[in-house]
Image: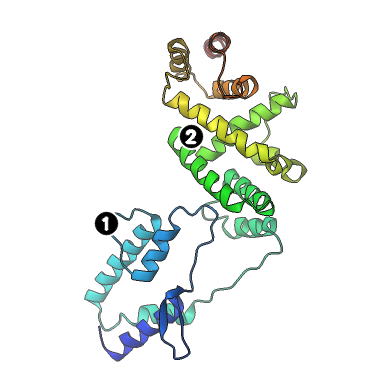
Amino acid sequence: MQDKASISTKQNIEKCLWKTDEFGEPDMSQLKIDSEVATDNDKEEFLEILRTGIVNKEMKSKYACNFRFFQNNIDEFLSKYPTYFAYLPTRIMNNCILLPIEAESQDTALRIFSTLNDRGKPLSDADIFKAQFYKHFSKLGKKEEFIAQWKKLEELCERIFHPISGTPMDELFTRYMYFVRAKMGIVSSTTEALRKFYEKNSYALLKDTNTLTELIVLAEFWEDVSNQDTERFSNRVLKQFFVLNYAPNGMWTYFVSVYFMQNKDDEGLLDDEKFYTFLQKITGFIWTYAIT
């Protein structure tokens, strides 16, 4: 539409999205909006949409889905009420106020976000742990390396873990927690909450660089279990895994995680004979407990 109101609205939107020169003309290469999320997998797609206003069929990100949703609804609104259309974005720009929130530390920022978002989708335990890792590796000058590692780890966990509650990453942290508890000699049958366990001593465990490495190793082990990797496991071991997959609960995965982390060799492999014997024992224990 080329009426005066629509042209003015378009110019106002442009000033929100792009930096302007001294004459008020927008520079399409200088966006005002950016994403600094540590593991934003679709950042480039998001920026491309802002630069071009075009969403291709190949784009599958949430940014693209949201853009299509609003584009379709705006087109419908425009076709029905063309003379009123300019009022919608104008009133949004005139009446919505964006308040910047500055926090003195990342921990404070997390608390603020969690408080403001308590009626929306809450932060998962893994979100909190990611923030602690991010802060730690940033101090070491390894921020980009961490982001790449976390992204791969997150994608891996989403493929292999499908927990009833929590996120796939929460599941990995839970399995690793049992290994750490075992190393500490904790034999109590009462398991504390995941976040409470990791936040001890100001998240000391997450400030240990080896922790992320061990999480990756543990996730790769379970990937091979999920894929029934015949190069890593013998046929008899895979059969035991098949039986354990039908166990009434997932406790066996914690036992196996502890065993693997404690007994793996330098190449991340286990002695087949000893591992098979171990699996036989926990299979008998779990199924006997289940039917008695």
Amino acid type at image mark 1: Lys
Q: Quadrant of the C terminus?
A: top right
Q: Please give the residue where the numbered disc 1 appears in the rendered image.
A: 57
Q: Determine the residue positioned at 63% across, 68% down.
A: 101
Residue 92 is left or right of residue 190, and the answer is left
Element on which disc 2 rests = loop
Q: In which quarter of the image is the N terminus?
A: bottom left
Q: Determine which of the numbered discs, if any, sits on residue 18 in the image.
A: none
Which mark lies nearer to you, 2 or 1?
Answer: 1
Front residue of this view, candidates 286 and 263? 263
Quadrant assignment, res 150: top right
Quadrant assignment, res 63: bottom left
Q: At which x and y percent is residue 82?
A: 25, 80
Q: Please give the residue where the numbered disc 2 appears in the rendered image.
A: 164
Amino acid type at image mark 2: Ile
Front residue of this view, candidates 45 and 102? 45
Element on which disc 1 rests = loop
Residue 56 appears in the rendering: yes
Which residue is most to the right?
A: 201
Q: Determine the residue positioned at 77% across, 42% down.
A: 201
Q: How many labels does the image show?
A: 2
Colour pattern: rainbow
Q: At which x and y percent is residue 207?
A: 70, 44
Q: At which x and y percent is residue 180?
A: 69, 29
